[in-house]
Image (cartoon, rainbow, N blue to C red):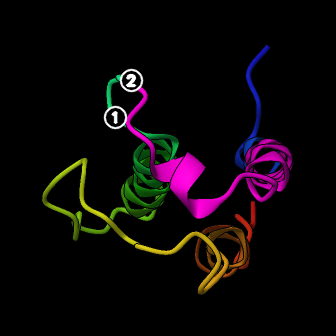
Amino acid sequence: MLLDLPTAASYNEWANNRVYNVLRELSDADRKEDRRAFFGSIHNTMNHLLLADLIYRERLEKKPTTYTRLDEELFENFEAPRRIEWVDQVFLGGRFSA
């Protein structure tokens, strides 16, 4: 079953909120600890997911991609500004209007 863009954006918001709420319980050091994952740490993995969301949005809006690296660090600190709120404003705030 294919989803329309507003439904996909709502699901993305729901999933991001679940993940970020759990990650808020970890310390910054725990999130940044090298866990030998593809992007090293939880912090870097979440940063990559945020970057992928933003690149996907640019593609949907037929805008040129403004990011040059998939490991570009968008935020050094998890809570300042709270990244999920930033995603809500930048990616979900406009909601796709069909």
Q: Is residue 93 left or right of residue 22?
A: left
Q: Nearer the viewer, residue 86 or 94?
A: 86
Q: Residue furthest top?
A: 1
- Magenta-highlighted residues: 10-35
Residue marked by disc 1: 40
Quarter of the image with the N terminus is: top right
Within-10-Å neighbours for mark 2: few <14, some 14–19, many 20+:
few
For numbered disc 2, what is the local secondary structure? loop
What amino acid type is highlighted by mark number 2? Answer: Ala
Q: Quadrant of the C terminus?
A: bottom right
Local packing at callout 1 (Cα closer than 10 Å; few below 14, some 14-19, many 20+) is: few
Q: Residue 65 at x, y = what percent?
A: 23, 63
**What is the three-letter code of the residue carrying label 1?**
Gly
* Residue at screen point 44% across, 64% down: 61
> Which residue is drawn at the image coordinates 45% and 43% (left, top)?
33
Q: Which residue is mark 2?
A: 37
Q: Name which residue lies at 73% across and 50% down.
A: 23
Q: Main secondary structure of the magenta part?
A: helix
Q: Residue 26's spot in the image, x, y percent?
A: 72, 52
From the viewer's perspective, is 38 left or right of 93? left
| SS of the residue under disc 1 | loop
Residue 44, image x and y in percent?
A: 40, 48
Instruction: Measuring from the top left, give residue 25's x and y in whole percent.
Output: 81, 54
Do callouts 2 and 1 mark residues in contact (Cβ within 8 Å)? yes
Residue nearest the viewer, comparing 29 with 95: 29
What's the CA distance linking mark 2 and mark 1?
A: 5 Å
User: Looking at this rendering, what residue extends furthest in the bottom direction?
Assistant: 81
Q: Nearer the viewer, residue 19 or 7?
A: 19
Determine whether 82 is above or below 84 in the image. Answer: below
